[in-house]
Image (cartoon, rainbow, N blue to C red):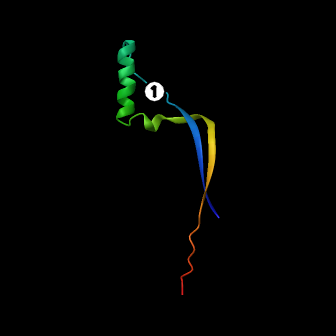
């Protein structure tokens, strides 16, 4: 019997980044979004927390390999 198990988790990642001094709140948000969108922040991301959301299983019918005579 073959079963496909699907696990849904919420992963919270954390990055400690340096940003230029003197930016207002809007500029800080834009700086962070720009780093994320360019992929520059992905190397700084560390998994901080994983929360289990759900798990489900589905039985997959196996096809017979026998040939009719």
- In this image, 25 relative to 66: left or right? left
Q: Position of residue 56 (x, y in %)?
A: 62, 47
Res 9 quadrant in image = top right
* Residue 65 sits above or below residue 55 on the image: below
Q: Position of residue 62 (x, y in %)?
A: 59, 67
Q: Position of residue 11 (x, y in %)?
A: 56, 36
- In this image, 26 relative to 55: left or right? left
Res 49 quadrant in image = top right
Q: Position of residue 27 (x, y in %)?
A: 35, 17
Residue at the spot 49% in from the left edge and 27% down from the top edge:
16
Q: Nearer the viewer, residue 33 or 52?
A: 52
Res 21 quadrant in image = top left
Q: Which residue is mark 1?
A: 17
* Residue 6 sits above or below residue 2 on the image: above
Q: Nearer the viewer, residue 5 or 64?
A: 64
Residue at the spot 37% in from the left edge and 30% down from the top edge:
35
Q: At numbered mark 1, what does the secondary structure look like: helix, strand or loop?
A: loop
| Mark 1 Cα shell of 10 Å, populated few (<14), some (14-19), many (≥20) | few
* Residue 24 sits above or below residue 8 on the image: above
**On-image quarter of the C terminus:** bottom right
């Amino acid at each position: 019997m073959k079963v496909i198990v699907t696990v849904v988790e919420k992963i919270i990642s954390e990055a400690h980044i340096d940003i230029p001094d003197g930016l207002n709140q809007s500029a800080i948000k834009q700086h962070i979004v720009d780093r994320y969108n360019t992929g520059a922040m992905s190397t700084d991301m560390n998994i901080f927390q994983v929360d289990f959301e759900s798990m489900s299983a589905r039985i997959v019918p196996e096809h017979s390999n026998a040939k009719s005579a």
